[in-house]
Image: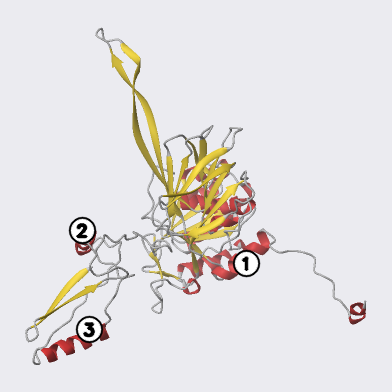
Amino acid sequence: MTTRLLTSSSCNIVIKLYVASYSQLFIQPASQRLLAAWLSEMDGGEEVRVEAAPYCCSTCDGGEVSGRSLARRNRKTRSLSTSSAGSSSEYRRTQSLHGPSPVTTFGPKACMLQNPHAVMHIQDPASQRLTWNKPPKSVLVIKKIRDASLLEPFKELCIFLTEVKNMIVYVEKKVLEDPAISGDENFGAITKKFCTFREDLDDISNRVDFIICLGGDGTLLYASSLFQESVPPVMAFHLGSLGFLTPFKFDTYQSQVTQIIEGNAAIVLRSRLVVRVLKENWEKKARMDEKGIILTNGDVESSRKAMQYQVLNEVVVDRGPSSYLSNVDLFLDGHLITTVQGDGVIVSTPTGSTAYAVAAGASMIHPNVPAIMITPICPHSLSFRPIVVPAGVELKIMLSRDARNTAWVSFDGRKRQEICHGDSITITTSCFPVPSICSRDPVNDWFESLAECLHWNVRKKQNYLSSEDEEF
């Protein structure tokens, strides 16, 4: 919040204008001109200028914003609903209930074409189009490991990208270690032009302009896990078993890839969850006696270890190998809302609502809906139904104090680990979505996936009732 002082010498008027962004009052330029004209008349014709603080988003790293933020935290504000005599510290949310504003730059060169007619900085999903700041030069090709059916499409695509489009192709090193690829002498000349990387060892986040996936939905999930911040645009070809997230057919890949390189395609921003796991590590502090002998029954010390993950589908907390019910507490924005007693709980994105969550009885949510879904797994309660909460809330899951056993957590089916007493899992919507390139548009692609992959609402049609049958 910025304070501007306007003084009128004739009437000794001091007007304080509080100019803010987002939920607070913003003085429009027309109002500024009217106010300036009125003050000029009061001051005998002297020109008075009214300036508002420039709008800046909350994530800006500029020094002016940080100064304002510091002043905001230290200032006592007056609520509009309370008496003018009283003052209290106003509680301010750090992010909107609708979730954080997603980053719309994808990799080093891609971004989303901005819509000048957007309302409240929330762009209509139907108008989300891919554009390039500069022509793309590099592409990451992700292929399902050791799948013989993908060898020919993989080779054909790589030859097209390197020889025809003159692209720099990035391929994971273990893909080229497949004997069916490394033993192909004719393809060997092409592989020498590839740039290779290793998962969890090499950072390619600023080297790849866009991604092409060959396989099923798992390839898209794997591509998401490689980028913990900004994700390049993803083009997924349906060459796997399910293909709910892979809208493209490989038959016409040349024209489709050319269209993407030219920047003519619709995209859907698939929101991700940022998950922070805080673990208590209990260690014994060894003691030594006077003779230097180490005593094993030393004092116990705890240290906290934090890990962070970006999740596209879901976070699953379950009972693991134990035969007892899992017993975990679920907090929302710091308030305990329920205790989950059952096989576990699923916290999913709209994209993940058609995965494990729908198998557990949840509804299916379109990827453009800003939400987080909470779905119990076989709850020991007839009234515990799946719920949908705003994307901006912060969820926290902890093992209940009276739980008989530990719990286990996994992130998109990977990185599975045990959760003990004192550990916590914090979940909220990430600022870094996955820009998934559409074959047609976000709505048609989604409903086609529902019909083709899940056979949504497929049944035998009811017979036509003739006029003679109506009489009976």
Instruction: Find the distance from the CA under tag 3 to the CA under tag 1.
Output: 48 Å
Asked whether the viewer can see residue 159, the reply is no
Point 26% across, 79% down: residue: 27
Look at discs 3 and 2 and give the one toward the viewer.
2
> Residue 226: where, in percent of width, then height?
44, 49
Can you identify the residue that label 1 sits on? Answer: 447
Q: Let me know if residue 50 appears in the view.
A: yes
Tell me the residue that label 3 is attached to.
32
* Vertical placement of residue 15 versus 255, above or below: below
Q: Nearer the viewer, residue 157 or 214?
A: 214
Going by the numbered disc 2, the residue's amino acid type is: Asn
Residue 80 x/y as whole percent? 30, 70
Residue 122 lies in what quarter of the image? bottom left
Residue located beneath label 2 in the image: 74
At mark 1, the secondary structure is helix
The answer to whether marks 3 and 2 mark residues whose Cβ atoms lie closer than 8 Å is no
Residue 256 found in image quarter? bottom right
